[in-house]
Image (tube, rainbow, N blue to C red):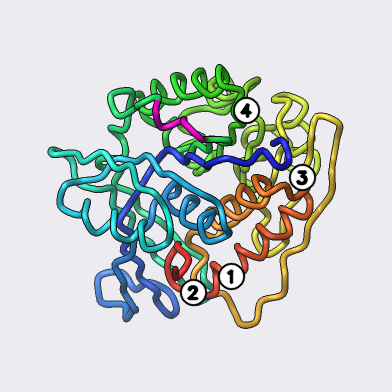
């Protein structure tokens, strides 16, 4: 990303209703497990947009939502400062993600893609790029054919306008089903920044060592690579090699819920770079956002 690119950030991808169940101890089959359960707004792309706005960026989100919860999601995005370009699906419900969070804050997710899987070319309008300096795509967009078609169109339009582009691979499980080669074919050579977590970086590079994985990915794509390492911070690499490691800040209290921590990292990183912050300092801001995210329930900033 060009430092100080300025302009609006356009985020494209998924929006979801999260059912977050925080439970103590192990799940007990065939009977009840006590839990604290909340219905919260989520979705990787929507979370990134919310965190970027929280860190001062001017943000628009393009996503698809079911009619049953469109007004609630629009209001929640507006509350945290995101301009919501929501396409209302009359047939499919909003994406629902069930997040099972244990007493260490680690989560297991069940995902019903719903309306997000139908986001496609018909939802696009070139006017969405007016005033935009950077485009960020959630990897979930690439896991369904309508989204892949939209991604190809959007990447082409962004390249024509000379805009910066970033992609978060989003899910090691879905990425494995799509195939690393297919993913890199879709985004390689034209993306300025990739933001994988360690599992995704290993899958895409074929290397197990974090630094080696980041360097290989940077060499293959020509992109800035920001690998999210959770409580160990992040590391950055570019075509010229490893740029450095950034530690995560010490937590004031134990993690409550890691849902959305990677999205918080991405949103803060994008906001900082758009404001002109150099990559390593921007990654430090991003790690601070991730640390903040894990100390509250849900995947969004409080607004």
Distance of label 4 from label 3 (alpha carbons): 15 Å
- Helix, strand or loop for disc 2: loop
Quarter of the image for residue 143 reads top left
x and y, in percent, of residue 167 in the image:
56, 36
Residue under label 3, please give it: 236
Disc assigned to residue 191? 4
Helix, strand or loop at label 1? It is helix
Q: Are discs 1 and 2 less than 8 Å apart at CB?
A: yes
Q: What secondary structure predominates along the stretch shown in magenta?
A: helix
Label 4 crowd (10 A; few <14 / some 14-19 / many >=20): many
* Residue 292 image-quadrant placement: bottom right
Q: Residue at coordinates 33% horizontally, 61% vertically from top-left? A: 76
Sequence-first tag of 4 and 2? 4
N-terminal of the pair, mark 4 or mark 1, is 4
Q: Toward the viewer: 46 or 131?
A: 131
**Which residue is tagged 1?**
292
Q: Is residue 133 magenta?
A: no
- Give the residue number, with chain letter if any, for mark 2: 296
Image quarter hosting the C terminus: bottom left
- Nearer to me, 280 or 38: 280
User: In terms of depth relative to the viewer, which is nearer, 42 or 255?
Assistant: 42
Give the Cα distance between marks 1 and 3.
Answer: 21 Å
What residue lies at 32% left-to-right and 81% top-to-bottom?
Answer: 34
Q: Which residues are magenta?
A: 127-131
Reading the chain from its start, which is encountered first: label 4 or label 3? 4
């Amino acid at each position: 990303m060009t430092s100080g690119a300025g302009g609006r950030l356009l985020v494209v991808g998924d929006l979801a209703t999260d059912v977050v169940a925080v439970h103590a101890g192990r799940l007990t089959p065939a009977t009840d497990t006590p839990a604290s359960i909340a219905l919260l707004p989520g979705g990787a792309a929507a979370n990134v947009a919310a965190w970027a706005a929280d860190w001062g960026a001017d943000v628009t989100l393009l996503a698809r939502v079911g009619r049953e919860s469109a007004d609630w999601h629009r209001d929640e995005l507006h509350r945290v400062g995101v301009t919501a370009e929501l396409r209302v699906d009359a047939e499919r419900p909003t994406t629902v993600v069930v997040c099972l969070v244990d007493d260490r804050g680690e989560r297991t997710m069940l995902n019903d893609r719903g309306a997000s899987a139908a986001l496609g070319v018909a939802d696009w309008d070139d006017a969405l790029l007016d005033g935009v300096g950077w485009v960020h795509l959630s990897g979930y967009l690439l896991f369904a054919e309508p989204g892949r078609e939209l991604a190809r169109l959007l990447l082409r339009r962004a390249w024509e306008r000379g805009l910066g582009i970033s992609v978060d691979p989003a899910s090691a499980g879905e990425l494995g089903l799509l195939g690393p080669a297919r993913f890199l074919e879709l985004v390689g050579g034209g993306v300025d920044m990739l933001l994988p977590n360690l599992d995704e970086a290993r899958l895409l590079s074929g290397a197990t060592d974090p630094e080696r994985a980041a360097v290989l990915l940077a060499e293959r794509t020509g992109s800035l690579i920001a690998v999210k390492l959770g409580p160990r911070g992040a590391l950055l690499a570019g075509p010229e090699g490893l740029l450095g490691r950034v530690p995560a800040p010490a937590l004031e209290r134990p993690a409550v819920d890691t849902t959305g921590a990677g999205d918080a990292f991405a949103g803060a990183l994008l906001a900082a770079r758009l404001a002109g912050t150099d990559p390593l300092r921007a990654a430090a801001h991003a790690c601070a956002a991730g640390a903040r995210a894990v100390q509250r329930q849900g995947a969004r900033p409080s607004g």
